[in-house]
Image: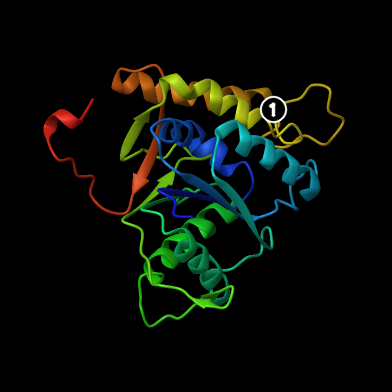
Amino acid sequence: MKLDILAIGAHPDDVELGCGATIAKEISLGKKIGVLDLTRGELGTRGSSEIRKKEAAKAAKILGVSIRENLAFADGFFLNDKEHQLKIIKRIRKYKPEIIVCNAIDDRHIDHSKGSKLVSDACFLSGLVKIETFLDGQKQEAWRPKQVYHYIQWKNIEPDFVVDISEFIEVKMNAVKAYDSQFYNPASKEPSSPISSKNFLDSVLYRAQDLGRLVGVDYAEGFTTERYVAVKSLDNLI
């Protein structure tokens, strides 16, 4: 299956938090989108990898993505090396996305910036014809996505552009809340974490509101780019 967009996150829930509404919007426009989780989130303070797997499946259904895979890299300890790069390259060549969105380039959790650079490097290497990869016994063709974008996570990184998600904020929040074990739940008896507070869950909404305010819409999600943003004409801007 060829995808238009492949959204990649170091942990299950990264994609939902960073760009869940953008994904839902693009799907509504007829795009085929997949999600690739690098780890199972097994080091998370709350819940377990088994619970996260079920939550990720529920969130994927809410967003309406075509596929969701997990590479089961070691949470907290995966590396940006040949072994890990090749596993991502195989998925890039399998799905041939035009666009990849991935973790923030700088963030509180070490896996986020690590995952960001790992995916970016794999995107470049995937386009080199002399790197041979095989999937299900078949040699894969080289493929390099046209664009790599990075969503914003814990830190308030200034975006290079924002997407109007006003009609899809409810889908995003429902997908985020699918991760019952991770986020605010006053009935939970599990240890607290930086993302389990009501303040954090509220921040997902008010960040989108604030980015929207700055561009004259109700809600927006922000992204950074690896090259200049280009438009075909001035009237493409909102």
Image position, residue 170 (x, y; %): 54, 20
Its colouring scheme is rainbow
* Residue closest to the eye, 148 or 98: 98
Say which quarter of the image contains residue 60. Answer: top right
Residue at 40 percent across and 48 percent down: it is 4
The residue that label 1 is drawn on is 197
| 106, 150: nearer the viewer | 150
Residue kind at label 1, given as amino acid type: Ser
The answer to which quarter of the image holds residue 174 is top right
Front position in the image: 73 or 136: 136
Left or right, 70 with respect to 227, comes to right
Residue 59 sits in quarter: top right
Tell me: residue 64, above or below residue 109: above
In the rendering, at what x and y percent does residue 106 appear?
Answer: 47, 50
For mark 1, give the secondary structure. loop
Is residue 166 left or right of 35 when viewed as pictured? left
Residue at point 69%, 63% (across, down):
74
Name the residue located 77 percent from the left edge and 50 percent from the top edge. Answer: 49
Q: Quadrant of the C terminus?
A: top left
Q: Where is residue 51 in the image (x, y as percent from the top left)?
A: 79, 43
Q: Position of residue 213 (x, y in %)?
A: 36, 18
Mark 1 nearby-residue class (10 Å; few <14, some 14–19, many ≥20): some
> Which residue is outermost to the left?
233
- Give above or below for 167 relative to 4: above
6 displayed left or right of 198 = left
